[in-house]
Structure formats: C-alpha cells, structure tokens
Image: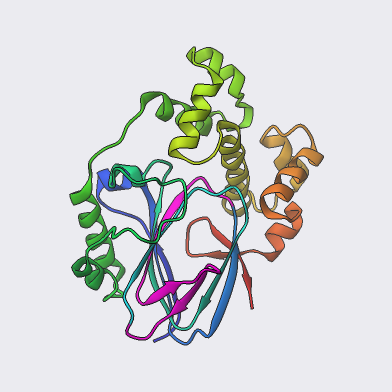
C-alpha cells in the first residue's frame, strides 16, 4: 500500500453543519514522521488504528495494539506532532463547538485520550477501509446517531459575528452592542472553547489570511494582505504571524505544505 492523504466532506446536511471535513492518512512504511501544525479555530478527533500516546506526546505504533482516540482542542500555540512506526488514522475536523453537538458532559478545552468516542465495532469499520465513500457513510451515520445538540445563544451569536466581521471586530464594541459584560463573554469562551474572546478572534483572523493567501489570491503580497484584513500596519501583521507560527509570513508560507484540498497546511519535518 502506498501513502495516502485524502480530505473529504461530510454529506449528511446536519453533520455538515458541525464538521468541516474528514481526512484519511496512511503511511505503511513510516519509521519516524514529524510535522508542525498551527493554531486553528477548528478542533479534531483522530482515530489511530494501533497507537499509544507517550508521556512525551509521541504517537507510537504498537503491533496488534488497540485503536487510540485522541481529541485535540482549539489551540493558540504551535504543536509539534511526532509519529513512530506505520501510520493509519482517520480524522474528523470539527467547526467551533462542533464536537459538543455529538458528545455531552466532556471537557473539550484540553487534549483527551481516555474517552471511547466510538465503539470497537465502529472503529473496526472506520479503520478497516480506505474507500472514502464508505468512510463518509460510516462517519456521517455514526455522528448523526449521536447528535444531541448544544446551543448557547450568546456564544453562537458572538462566534458568528466574529467570522462575519473579523477584519474589524472589537470585544468592547460587541459587549456593548449585546449588553453583556466582557467578563461573562470571556467566561463562556474559556469554558467551552478554552481561549478568551480576543484570542479566538485573533486565531480566526490569522486563519482567514492563510485561506486568502492559499486559495484566493496566492500572488498577493503581504503588505496588501495586511491592508485587506485591516491590520494596523505590516508590523502588526508580522507580529501576529510570529505569535502564532514563530515565523514571519514569508517564512511560514515558504516552509509549509498544503495537504489535501482544505486548509491543512503543515511544516513537514524529517
């Protein structure tokens, strides 16, 4: 079997409201593989066929071992991922508050590796095929069967407002407009997303610039990109990239690799 990295979208309308995309990653001859991924407003649930996660956060293949289910929360820092041995995983990429629609009573603000999100029978099906159409059907059905719904009107309203007005969002202005205190807003964001309102907004704006550069206007220079997204100046734009990637914008895009057909943009290491 050759290496595979394929992204694909959910087809069930309800599931598609809360899941951005799925992907399948297979590296049968992998010995050691590392990559750096960057802050994102999405969260992920990774299903590894036969791995353990060590205290050093390495993903290690264990022959004949049990599947590992790992939830990765919304992050505001660079994450180094190291995988040892053959690799087979299926990943669900959720929109903000997406996973809460299917699983209740769990703290989703930190890494989770000790929850059975899917049953052994479901994992056998999900990790037993490389047919993306089959995977879509399984994932859509298993998630739909778990749908419980989660909604906090103020939180939803603020998240949607940030996405629509990321270029000019102000926590103070939104707080005054909604007649709710900044403290209450931040409490909601910290409880359900793990970051403050301001940090969430900065991550959204950061990811919007990446999407623009990768898919809309790849030839656009960074000065123009900074202006388009209403950064104060080029220095402010560079500062955001330094904070979230430890790279300048030019370094970040030069070193990155786009995987699949979505915004999975990693720095691949040897």
- The single residue placed furthest to the front in the displayed view is 55
Q: Name the residue located 76 percent from the left edge and 44 percent from the top edge.
A: 239
Q: Is residue 231 left or right of residue 33?
A: right
Residue 63 x/y as whole percent: 37, 86
Give residue 165's quadrant in the image.
Answer: top right
Residue 238 x/y as whole percent: 77, 45
Q: Is residue 268 left or right of residue 90?
A: right
Whether the magenta-drawn stretch holds residue 57 is answered as yes
Q: Is residue 64 left or right of residue 74?
A: left
Specify the segment rendered in magenta. Answer: 39-64
Give residue 44's quadrant in the image.
Answer: bottom left
Q: Name the residue located 31 percent from the left edge and 54 percent from the top edge.
A: 10
Above or below, 110 relative to 179:
below
Q: Name the residue located 39 percent from the left edge and 55 percent from the top edge.
A: 21
Of residues 88 and 8, the one nearer the viewer is 88
Q: Name the residue located 62 percent from the left edge and 56 percent from the top edge.
A: 78
Of residues 148 and 213, the one nearer the viewer is 148
Residue 264 x/y as whole percent: 52, 59
Give the quadrant of the C terminus: bottom right
Q: Is residue 224 left or right of residue 73?
A: right
Residue 185 x/y as whole percent: 50, 25
Give residue 214's quadrant in the image.
Answer: bottom right
């Amino acid at each position: 079997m050759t290496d595979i990295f394929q992204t694909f979208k959910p087809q069930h309308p309800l599931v598609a409201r809360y899941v951005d995309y799925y992907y399948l990653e297979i590296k049968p001859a992998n010995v050691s593989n590392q990559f750096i991924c960057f802050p994102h407003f999405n969260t992920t649930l990774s299903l590894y066929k036969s791995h353990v996660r060590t205290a050093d956060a390495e993903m290690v293949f264990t022959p004949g071992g049990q599947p590992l289910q790992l939830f990765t929360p919304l992050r505001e820092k660079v994450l180094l991922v190291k995988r040892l041995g053959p690799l087979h995983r299926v990943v669900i990429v959720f929109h903000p508050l997406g996973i809460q629609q299917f699983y209740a009573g769990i703290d989703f603000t930190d890494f989770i590796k000790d929850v059975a999100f899917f049953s052994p029978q479901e994992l056998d099906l999900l990790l037993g095929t490389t047919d993306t159409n089959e995977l879509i059907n399984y994932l859509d059905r298993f998630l739909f069967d778990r749908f419980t719904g989660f909604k906090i009107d103020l939180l939803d309203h603020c998240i949607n407002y940030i996405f629509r007005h990321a270029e000019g969002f102000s926590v103070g202005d939104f707080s005054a407009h909604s007649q709710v205190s900044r403290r209450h807003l931040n409490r909601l964001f910290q409880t359900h997303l793990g970051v403050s309102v301001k940090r969430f907004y900065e991550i959204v704006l950061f990811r919007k610039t990446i999407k623009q550069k990768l898919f809309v206007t790849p030839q656009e220079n960074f000065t123009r990109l900074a202006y388009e997204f209403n950064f104060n100046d080029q220095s402010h734009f560079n500062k955001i990239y330094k904070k979230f990637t430890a790279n300048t914008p030019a370094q970040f895009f030069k070193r990155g690799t786009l995987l699949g057909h979505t915004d999975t943009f990693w720095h691949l290491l040897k």
